Image (tube, helix red, strand yellow):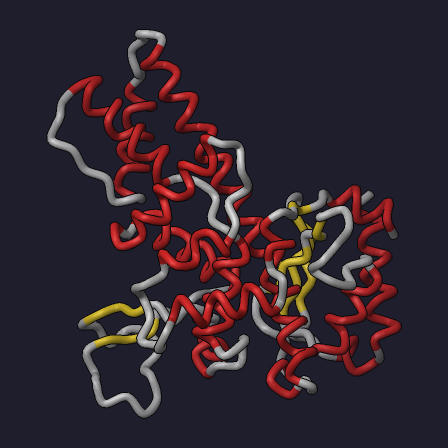
Amino acid sequence: MKIRLLVFVFLSLIFAGREALSDDKFKMELKPEGLYLDNLNTGLLQKIFEDFGYMSFIAEDFVIPPIMLESMPVDFDMVQPQSERNRLFIMIMAPLILKVNEEIIIERDEIEQLKKVLKEGKKLSQKQKERIEALATKYDIFTRMKDNEKYDIMLDRLLLKVDVVPPSLVIAVAAAESNWGTADEVKEGNALFKLKDWFTTEGIKPKDEPDDSYRIRPYPDLLSAVRDYVLKLNSDINFQHLWISRKQLRQHHQVVKGRITVYNMVVGSPLENYAGLLSYILTFYDLINIDMSELSGLSAIVEKK
């Protein structure tokens, strides 16, 4: 199966033109969870999308192929018209956020299993306790309780925080903060969300910014940027209304959609009418389709091809 998939990609490169093949910076890596690409131009990206049947983020079967870009195409800001560039941006972002949500589900399943141990009156092993402590640190959870009561409280709070986020919401934020992937911070350090680190000289110094007390946090790849922003949504107390809305939707077996949660986004950006801007992006591009989608497996891609 891997050989067949690699043949498809290789043929895509051939059809995309000799210039793409001659670029020794181009990167292609096949991993169990998807196909990772880097240092490619937009023409090559579109051809690869086409070859794998990824023509739109609005799909009848609500399945999106796991094609992961590590950085934006080198010529992305030159794509015209802007509507086409925006469409490609959404298609690039969709697999990344769906991948992060898959990772969160794995974490949540682990937390539920740990909670089950306590419900059954069993003792947690030292390894299990250390895992709960690590997750609590990750998601900024603290309690002064001791023993099983301590871990019971931690697990309850983790179940509130560790859950999927609406892909449409994350994509809309990335679009607003990065000017649809064309901001200098994205080119320099994959900083889609322009998260700030204060009182440091490490990171990306914003241009034309008199305030020298912060830097924009850089990332090795786009997926890392998405992971970090989703962690912020799931750990920062300013987004507790998002957690509560999500919990209520889960209790009623409803899909968590960006349109429902977008008005919880009243903090986190200097942009004016932030929630309104995100709502406009969500509605105009009908991003609810991604909220209802999932990643396909590699085998599904091969069979489709």
Report the residue at 66% width, 47% height from top: 295
What residue sits 61% from the left and 70% below the top? 89
- Asked which quadrant contains residue 8, the reply is bottom right
Residue 127 screen position, x and y as percent: 33, 23
Give 289 or 38, whichever is nearer the viewer. Answer: 289
Q: Is residue 31 left or right of residue 1?
A: left
Q: Residue furthest bottom?
A: 208
Please state if 264 lies on the left or on the right of 52 as rendered.
left
Give the image location of residue 77, x and y in percent: 60, 84
Outermost residue, left direction?
A: 144
Above or below — where is 238 with respect to 154?
below
Quarter-wise, where is residue 194 in the image? bottom left
62 in relation to 37, above or below? above
Rendered location of residue 276, percent (x, y) = 43, 69
* Residue 290 point in image, percent of width and height: 62, 54
Q: How many marks?
A: 0
Q: Quadrant of the N terminus?
A: top right
Which is nearer the eye, 283 or 84?
A: 283
| Left or right: 55, with 139 as reference point | right
Q: Residue at x 46, y 66 (%)?
A: 173
Q: Is residue 189 above or below residue 5?
A: below
Decide: is 93 above or below 133: below
Q: Residue at x 39, y 59 (%)?
A: 263
